[in-house]
Structures are given as structure tokens and as C-alpha cells.
Amino acid sequence: MDDETREMLHQTAESIFADGPPDLWEVLRSVGIDKALVPESKGGVGVSWAIACELLGIAGKHAAAVPLAEAMIGHWLLDLAGIEDAELPTIAFSAPLEPVRLSRSGDEWHVDGALVRVPWGSACTHVAFISEGPAPQLIVVSRRASGVSVTPGQNLAGEPRDDMTLEGVAPLAVVPAPFESNSVLAIAAVMRSAQMAGAIERALDLTVDYANMRVQFGRPIGKFQAVQQSIAVLATQAAAARAATEAGSEAIDVWIVGEDESLMRSVAVASAKIRTGESAGEAAAISHQVFGAIGFTEEHELHRFTKRLWSWRDEYGSEAFWADVIGESILGNESEKTLWRTLAPTRSSLDIGATR
């Protein structure tokens, strides 16, 4: 995709989110942003994962209450499963100690188990997930299928996170998965990081504007050195989150065309969620400190971003979870690659990975 088309997508997304129409999701669907990762030959836009994350960053910067990240991944998985014309697909994962059970009787498949904290589980039309085990299967279930029940829930920001129970459900599709479930988790973590990076940038903008407007002791509080130092830290956190997310999204693009079966071994992917999560905590704390009590009021928009940051940093793996993943990956590395070369690869190793 050339730079002109990329810029056009950015401008379109920015315009839609800035307008904030009451039917925001329908507008996004009408221009195909929800199918950004689906090839153009199949009715999508055909962008890279890096560009998809840029679009999600714009959504995060506007605190858009829409399931864009999940729909993007969902449409991509449904395309792999051969399912078309889905209105609102989402993704799901089973409870860590209770994997979903897939059984077969003749030519008929059945799914039993529980999917936890499914984003927009009540509103979705399709749910895509990958079974555990030595032969993972990509499974697509209709939300309206017999045997599907949903218990509503939400995160701190009020976004739907519903538990879904499957009892003898006949899936729409069961196909061999080209990768394990953890790779989908890694993709979702990076895409959530992109939304967080956008929200952090908006928190920075709001904080700078307020510091320049709020007068205390005869001058704007932004003129006080302590406040300036706090805002400078907030700015560095925003930049770090953006850089980490960009590296993580580019790693997904390399993995898509590569040979590695698991994305969990990517330091860039894990680091994206770790670093963005750390930035989210710092950004929320600093922005609320500068705003004082007004930032927590329902009338002010700051809490729309900070509540999402507090919620999103725990979704698809917290910083502690991904730090463990990095540690286990490095310590369990059976190759001759050292810890230093894992964290700081040489140019030759980067070239090999990018062209594989």
C-alpha cells in the first residue's frame, strides 16, 4: 500500500471518529474499516498489521466505544475459516484451566465449554477462537446458535466483556488452525496496545491544554516547574508507548510471512504490551494529578481515556504476564542465541527475519 492510500485511510478514520456519529459502528462498517485486514479480493481493505494498528491508535485517541480491534481480528480469522458476510465477529479465549472441548460424531462437530470475558459477546454475530492441544482447530460459532448462552459483564470503562457458555453447540466452521491460540492472544495484545497508545496521546493533549488554561497564584499551572516536569514525563511515556506498539505491529507482519509457528517468542510483541501498560499507568496518574478532582467528574472527558487505560492494560495479558513470557522464551531458548542478541539483534539477524 502506497503512502497516499495510507494517508487517505488515516484521514478517513480521523474524520469519522472526530465527528462521533451516533451510528459510529455502522459508519465504520460502511467504509470497511472493520475488514481492514481482509484482502481486497474478498471485500476487505487489505492493509498490513502495522497500518491496522495505526487505525486502532486513532480509535483509542477518541475513546471510541466500538469493538474495532476484535472485529478486525475476527474478520481475519473468519476469512481463514471460509466464513463470509459476518456483521460483527469477535474473538474469544477459554478459561486457562478449562479449555473448550471439541468433539465429533460422524460428520458433526460439537463444542462445549466456557469462553471468558468475550468483548461484545452479547452484541456479536460470530465468535472465533482456537482450540488447545497438539492439533489446534480454528472454530467459528454463531452467537445465535442453539446451546449458546451469555452472561453480561463489563470492564471498568463500561465496555462489554461477557462470559459465554457453549453446550453441545454445532459450530459454523472447524478447520485446522495454522497457528496456536497463543499467537492470536499475542496479536490481540499488540492491537490493544495500539489503542492504549492513542488514549495516552489524548490524555497528554488534554493535560497540556488544561495546564496552560488553569490559573493558580496568578499564572497558568503549566508555568510551574514541577508541573512541567510531570508533563515532560507524560510526553516521554506517550512516545515510548507509540514506539513499542509500532515495533510490535511490525513484528506481526514479519511473522505472518515467516515460518515461526508461535508469535509468543517475539520480544517486540511482548514488549509492546509491557511498555504500553507501564506507560498507561504513568499517564493516568500524571494526568489526574495535574487535573485534580475535576478529571474524575462524569462531565469531564479525561476519565473516558484513563478508565480505558486501566482496563486495557490488563486485557490480553498484563505486564507481569508478558514479562514471564519473555523470560521463559529467553531462558528456554535451545539455540546458541544469547540473552544480549535476543534483546539487541544484529543487522544480519534482522535481515534474515524480515526476508524469511
Image: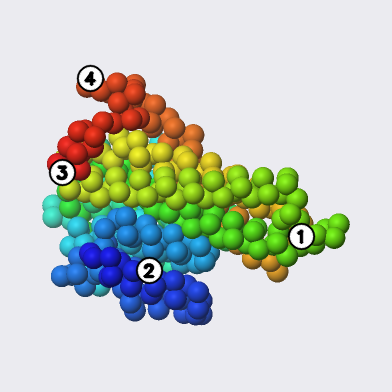
**Is residue 172 something that shows in the picture?**
no
- Residue type highlighted by circle 4: Glu
Which percent across, then down, holds residue 238? 52, 50
- The span from disc 4 to disc 2 (Cα, nearest Å) is 42 Å
Residue in the foreground of this view, choosing between 202 and 175: 202
Which percent across, then down, holds residue 143? 36, 64
Which percent across, then down, holds residue 127? 33, 59
First in sequence: mark 3 vs mark 4? 4
- The span from disc 3 to disc 1 (Cα, nearest Å) is 53 Å
Which residue is located at x 37 percent, y 50 percent?
246
Which residue is located at x 19 percent, y 69 percent?
40
Q: For residue 141, which numbered disc appears in the image?
A: none
Q: Mark 2 points at which residue?
A: 10
**Is residue 266 something that shows in the picture?**
yes
- The span from disc 2 to disc 3 (Cα, nearest Å) is 27 Å
- The span from disc 4 to disc 1 (Cα, nearest Å) is 57 Å
Q: Mark 1 points at which residue?
A: 220
Mark 3 Cα shell of 10 Å, populated few (<14), some (14-19), many (≥20): few
Q: Could you tell me which secondary element the residue under label 1 belongs to?
A: strand
Q: Nearer the viewer, mark 1 or mark 2?
A: 1
Q: Which of marks 3 and 1 is in front?
A: 1
Q: In which quarter of the image is residue 76?
A: bottom left
- Residue type highlighted by circle 2: His
- The span from disc 1 to disc 2 (Cα, nearest Å) is 34 Å
